[in-house]
Image (tube, helix red, strand yellow):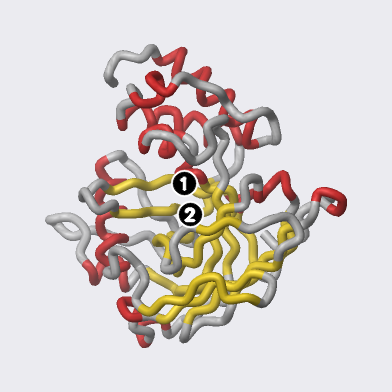
Amino acid sequence: MSGIASDFLGAFAQRLAAAHRGGERVTADVSTLEALSRDEALFIQHDVVSALSHPIAGWKVAALPDGDLISAPIIASRLFHSPVSMSPEVYGLGGVECEIAFRFGREPIPGRDGFASEHIIEAIDGACAAIEVADSRWASKFAIPRNAMIADLLSNGALVLGSLNKNWQDVPVETLPARLGINGNTICQTRGGHPHGDLIGLMIMLANDLGKRGLVIKPGEIVTTGSYTGFHTANPGDDIVAEFDGFTSVSVTFNSFENSGETDALR
């Protein structure tokens, strides 16, 4: 680590975990967040997951234009199946992204030189449309340095999954049409809108990176691979739908504050 004391990092993790449970967002000096190293961010990320005491249900991953790979676990209490009505305590700031997620039927086994496409493909059980709901536990919301976002589970608020397509290999994900709708209105429509395109290559990178950290993608876990429609926000009371050719649509309703109640979903 770069030198920020582990007890200081642990305190950040505890405050972020409290914010996940509905507590106040975490304030921090910009200079402090900018000083976080990748190792320190992953240290906090690990401690947040441990403090929340929920099993890991999957991973979110992205490869950024500068070549950096970023990832974070998705905890089981934030994984839902469409259709779902979601409380403000869960959707928070209400960011929404349309994604393709993959379910692993078994743990991928690497070759002598690490993971290759065949190791990933043969381990995948199916794929589905998904809506990632983005939130931030930092008081500065989404205006945070990259490593601070990693520490906060890459701003994951929830992941809503559609029905599994076992014939996912027949779908050309590189040129896949996608649509984000809110309250019946098309907000964004793309073809081949994923910035990386090679979703298998992205999961190869994830599996190799996790392996370096002594982690694996476990049977039954979900990997969601980033937005085809960019980042958008929805409001309380909105109905959000993601549609991809070759997959069943996926939907989530953001309950209003007056009707927040419990999130109604199958986990």
Q: To which residue does mark 1 refer?
A: 73
Q: Secondary structure at mark 2?
A: strand
Depth check: give the residue in front, 111 or 231. Answer: 231
Quarter of the rendering occupied by the N terminus: top left
Q: Position of residue 27 (x, y in %)?
A: 55, 23
Q: Give the crowd class for mark 2: few <14, some 14-19, many >=20 residues within 10 Å.
A: many
Q: Are marks 1 and 2 in contact (CB under 8 Å)?
A: yes
Does residue 168 lie above or below 200 as drawn? Answer: below
Q: Is residue 105 visible?
A: no
Does residue 211 lie above or below 241 as drawn? Answer: above
Q: To which residue does mark 2 refer?
A: 58
Quarter of the rendering occupied by the C terminus: bottom right
In the image as oriented, which residue stretches furthest toward the right? Answer: 258
Q: Is residue 35 left or right of residue 132?
A: left
Does residue 47 lie above or below 103 as drawn? Answer: above
The residue lying at 35 percent from left, 14 percent from top is: 4
